[in-house]
Amino acid sequence: MKRSSHVILTSHNSQVYKDSLPIKWGAATALERGPVIGSLTDTTKRNAIGTHSGSYTVYRALSIAQGRYATNHKPDLHNTESPVKIGPHASWFDAKKMVSIDPWGFDVPIHFQKYFADGYDVRPTVAVTQAHLQIPEIYEAVDQGRLKIDGKIINENKDIKITKVAFEPVWYLPGIAERLGVDEGELRKILFQETGGMFPELVTRPDLKVMLPPIGNTTVYIFGNPQDLAKPDVELTCRVHDECNGSDVFGSDICTCRPYLIYGIEDAARTAQRGGVGIIAYYRKEGRALGEVTKFLVYNARKRQAGGDSAATYFHRTECVAGVEDARFQELMPDILHFFGITKIHNLHSMSNMKYDAIVKSGIEVVNRISIPENLIPPDAQVEIEAKKAKGYFNPGAKKTEAELAAVKGRPIDE
């Protein structure tokens, strides 16, 4: 059936359809909770604001506009199920533990078989697969003896075997509001206003409690047995990493992001090799969730200011350009850790107090905190690391005085 081209704003009771299933967030089973229906093949069955694929939704729209994508397409999910067993965990049945992802969002043909049979187009928001990682720094770690080839975690060719899990965001709006300490109505109004009125249902349909926001997803890389993540007596090494394309992918040396990420990967693999389990959670929050354009503007401002790029003004220059020092607000970050049933992290690779505080506040115990070793910090990133240490970020090194901070300089913009 071809979808009508007529535009309908769901602002009236006549658009509340009887086939739209209720969602009981935090229910004890998938069927009792109900599926999240954000697909558009039958708009009378939708029970969520927004649609699937996050920030890629617009590209799908362009494909439809060009006639390259059929609006009535339903994905063939045969053989797409997870190759490993995950959950359910007690955290899945707690409406407050996970408010930004759907724990029942993977293997949906299994969890919601009844609704598939009834013609509902339920789409996955979580996908699990297995892969090998080929990372030059890991090859070097093997050559130098810090990691060993065991055929289980690290292959003969020095590749790392991993399980990886992709998450699309699914926001339970009452839970998001409570987590952030704001009124749900106020949250919905601000989301509507600050997206330029992108989703009218935020303010016209208070009965719709779930939103699929048009933002990036999160990817998790697991080293060892994924089921061991939920066992507090099994050593767990964790790095929660916020995306930095310039450093992570291209090796830009103005920050410590790639060295910190790779150090976390190496230690996660080493932990798995000694009988534990490792997890890297990679969140799409480029430039402290301010975006890469803003980040590059800040780089220019830092390097052109009077006196040059200095640790003393590192955070101030960001706030001058962006209006806020950091927009990540890590309150939603622990949800993905709870998806795996994690209750104890033995080794947390992070300097960030915001990350640490959010994890601990969510009920997860952290035993050891690990900061990046000095020898892994690029010269131009000394500005960042010294500013963070002075700001109170976790680091065993001594904090510099204001005069010493002013003396920590980065490269000029033209070098």
Image (cartoon, grey):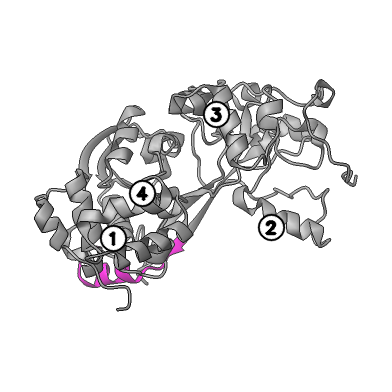
For residue 306, the mark is: none
Q: How crowded is the residue under tag 1: few (<14 C-alpha within 10 Å), some, or many (20+)? A: many
Front tag of 1 and 4: 4
Front tag of 2 and 4: 4
Q: Which of 110 and 164 is in front in this view?
A: 164
* Residue under numbered circle 2: 59
The answer, for residue 118, to whether it is visible in the render is no
* Residue under numbered circle 3: 187
Which residue is rendered at x = 62% and y = 30% of the image?
A: 210
Please indicate whether residue 122 sits to the left or right of residue 325 in the image. right
Tag 1: amino acid? Thr
For residue 319, the mark is: 4
Q: Is residue 336 above or below residue 396?
A: above
The answer, for residue 344, to whether it is visible in the render is yes
Magenta span of residues: 132-147
Mark closest to the chain's N terminus, 1 or 3? 3
Which residue is rendered at x = 32% and y = 55% of the image?
A: 317
Which residue is rendered at x = 81% and y = 25% of the image?
A: 17
Please indicate whether residue 349 sits to the left or right of residue 63 in the image. left
Front tag of 1 and 3: 3
* Structural distance between the alpha carbons of marks 1 and 3: 34 Å
Tag 3: amino acid? Leu
Label 4 element class: helix
